[in-house]
Image (cartoon, helix red, strand yellow):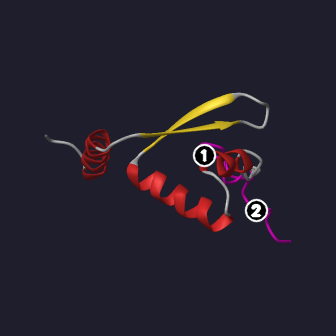
Amino acid sequence: MDLPEDEQQFLRDVVKASRQKIHAVQWVDRDGTHRNTMLSAPEVTRLNTIAARLKVQKGEVLRQAAHIPVPKLTKAATPGAPTVPPEPAS
């Protein structure tokens, strides 16, 4: 395939993930919605590690994680947004 390296890496990762066993984790979202989150083997291993350290179940970790606020991007950091040039010094 004649593709850029980043696209080849993306495709390799997709194929690798599709070959792995997928794990379903059931949990309840903060609004009470029942969810099933599909995780790859490395993701579920990391979630298990976090859950063991917190001494709670995997679903509880995800429920608590739903309350973590997403950091807001500053105007300059927003992709595609024009940056405001600094004012000239007088």
Residue at screen point 54% across, 56% down: 47
Residue 86: mark: 2
| Front-lying residue, 86 or 20 | 20
For the residue carrying disc 1, how many other residues have a C-alpha within 10 Å: few (<14), some (14-19), or many (20+)?
A: few
In this view, 2 is above or below 68: above
| Front-lying residue, 66 or 63 | 63
Residue at screen point 63% across, 45% down: 59
Q: Amino acid at mark 1?
A: Pro
Mark whose residue sits in front, 2 or 1 = 1
Residue 26 on the magenta span = no
- Range of the magenta residues? 74-90
In this view, 86 is above or below 69: below
Q: Amino acid at mark 2?
A: Pro
Quadrant placement of the C terminus: bottom right
In the rendered image, residue 61, in percent from the top left (x then y), is placed at: 66, 52
Nearest to N terminus: mark 2 or mark 1: 1
Q: Measure the C-alpha gap from mark 2 to mark 1.
A: 19 Å
Residue lying at the far bottom in this picture: please name it.
90
Residue at screen point 54% across, 63% down: 49
